[in-house]
């Protein structure tokens, strides 16, 4: 008898329905990168501006994570998931209809916020649906299709852009959303509110959001003047630091009863994993934006060609993912991360030297090695974040990990887009991409420092 036969049919159907709701946000985040060149052309703007359509999405997603937890506490989980899925569909249509770069970025922010409600909901409702006796089996089954997102998302996006328009990347979400809503209405039970007395930390969320926006906007402004040493950049970075200081004071006055209690960072492992996750998302997610552009602008591949060229990286992720958990249990998070960082550097440093004449076969090998290391860096860092924490600190740590990962990804996208744009103005396109890949490799090497403080077996 197979694993799926041992699980009640209604439970399995509900789990697949919940997972389906997360497919559209997952695919959307991987498809958009492949359309950056077309977006830049259609809106007659620069990479530094267009990256806000990607950075803003991830940033809004990070802000929505704690809001999602509050909504689950106050309202029926089924209704919240259906409302968030409907909102994602509507904002997808609006993003597809965008008539200026400003409207595109605004609609992407709304889209990212609705996606940020869906993703944590999926995890929580899966746990509630499966029950303790089935949770491991169900999650291993229903999350399998999500592994293919990084592989087939860019390919699907490439075909859409090549044969239709980048707008259909968003319109296609409507079909998935409609099917999801019908299945949710039919297959999901009600999920009563967990804690109707729960309060939303609006001041804390606002301060963290303003800090993040100011810091990322400051970095992106450097692209306008091809320099980080300009008044606009320095003013926004200073503003970001002021908001960070305000949050420290706010957390202290509230005795740690904030959305991200700073007392968590007194735990050595949580502090180390937080730094590591932030840096890892810069080094890993940042190049996801510039790799398709390199394939299109330097190697002169078509949109589909650029998408297909990214497949080896996704295959590398797919091959190693099943073994990461076993390796963490066998040798510990510290050793897995240290070895994976070496592998990741082997797959990242060669990107600094690629040219228009680099063989696609050689590039595929490098990307496969790079992709194979991703799980070995991110998964142990994420899991080790909870080591040594009290039970009452676990929910807050979960929110913290999500926020830190998303901030790292959005900051990394902004940073690398700025470096590429600024270097290109002064030294040319290839030099710009080389500078971006070099920055990614340097950030990757910095992860060795917090990795030393992770737990052993």
Image (cartoon, helix red, strand yellow):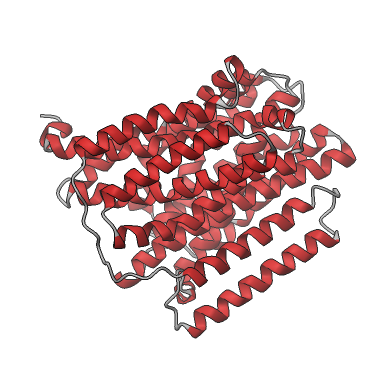
In terms of image quadrants, where is residue 20?
Answer: top left
At horizontal 50% and vertical 65% (from top left) the residue drawn is: 453
At horizontal 45% and vertical 72% (from top left) the residue drawn is: 264
Residue 21: percent from left, percent from top: 35, 38
At horizontal 32% and vertical 29% (from top left) the residue drawn is: 179
Q: In terms of depth relative to the viewer, which is nearer, 405 or 336?
A: 405
In terms of image quadrants, where is residue 174?
Answer: top left
Residue 142: percent from left, percent from top: 29, 36
Q: In which quarter of the image is the N terminus?
A: top left
Residue 421: percent from left, percent from top: 79, 41
Task: Give the vertical position of 394 relative to 358 (above or below).
Answer: below
Residue 57: percent from left, percent from top: 56, 46
Residue farthest along the right direction in this orientation: 426
Callout count: 0
Task: Give the vertical position of 12 relative to 407 (above or below).
Answer: above
In this rendering, does residue 334 appear at all?
no
In this rendering, does residue 24 appear at all?
yes
Residue farthest along the top direction in this orientation: 163
At horizontal 45% and vertical 41% (from top left) the residue drawn is: 88
Q: In which quarter of the image is the C terminus?
A: bottom left
């Amino acid at each position: 008898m197979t694993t799926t036969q041992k699980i009640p049919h209604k439970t399995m159907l509900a789990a697949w329905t919940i997972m389906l709701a997360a497919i559209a946000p997952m695919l959307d985040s991987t498809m958009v990168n492949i359309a950056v060149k077309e977006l830049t052309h259609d809106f007659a703007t620069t990479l530094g501006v267009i990256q806000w359509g990607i950075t803003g999405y991830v940033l809004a997603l990070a802000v929505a994570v704690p809001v999602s937890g509050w909504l689950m506490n106050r309202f029926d989980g089924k209704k919240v998931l259906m409302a968030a899925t409907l909102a994602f569909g509507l904002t997808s249509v609006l993003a597809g209809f965008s008539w200026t770069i400003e409207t595109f970025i605004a609609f992407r922010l709304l889209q990212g916020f609705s996606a940020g409600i869906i993703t944590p909901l999926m995890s929580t409702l899966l746990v509630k649906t499966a029950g303790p006796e089935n949770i491991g089996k169900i999650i291993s089954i229903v999350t399998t299709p999500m592994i293919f997102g990084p592989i087939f998302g860019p390919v699907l996006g490439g075909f859409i852009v090549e044969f239709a328009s980048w707008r259909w990347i968003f319109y296609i979400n409507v079909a998935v959303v409609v099917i999801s809503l019908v299945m949710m209405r039919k297959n999901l039970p009600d999920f009563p509110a967990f804690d109707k007395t729960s309060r939303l930390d609006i001041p804390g969320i606002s301060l963290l959001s303003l800090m993040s926006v100011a810091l990322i906007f400051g970095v992106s402004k450097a692209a306008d003047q091809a320099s980080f040493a300009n008044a606009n950049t320095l003013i926004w970075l200073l503003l970001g630091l002021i908001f960070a200081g305000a949050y420290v004071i706010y957390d202290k006055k509230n005795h740690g009863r904030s959305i991200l209690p700073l007392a968590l960072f007194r735990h050595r492992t949580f502090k180390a994993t937080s730094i590591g996750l932030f840096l890892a998302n810069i080094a890993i997610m940042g190049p996801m934006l510039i790799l398709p552009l390199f394939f299109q602008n330097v190697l002169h591949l078509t949109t589909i060609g650029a998408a297909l060229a990214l497949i080896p990286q996704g295959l590398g992720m797919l091959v190693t993912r099943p073994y990461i958990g076993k390796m963490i249990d066998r040798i510990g998070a510290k050793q897995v991360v240290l070895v994976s960082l070496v592998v990741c550097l082997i797959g990242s440093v060669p990107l600094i030297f690629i040219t228009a004449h680099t063989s696609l076969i050689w590039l595929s090998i490098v990307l496969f090695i790079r992709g194979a290391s991703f799980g070995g860096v991110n998964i142990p860092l994420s899991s080790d974040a909870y080591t040594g924490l009290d039970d009452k600190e676990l929910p807050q740590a979960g929110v913290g990990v999500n926020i830190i990962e998303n901030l790292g990804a959005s900051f990394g996208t902004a940073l690398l887009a700025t470096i590429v744009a600024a270097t290109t103005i002064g030294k040319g396109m290839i030099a710009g991409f080389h500078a971006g890949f070099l920055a990614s490799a340097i950030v990757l090497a910095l992860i060795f420092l917090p990795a030393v403080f992770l737990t052993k077996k």
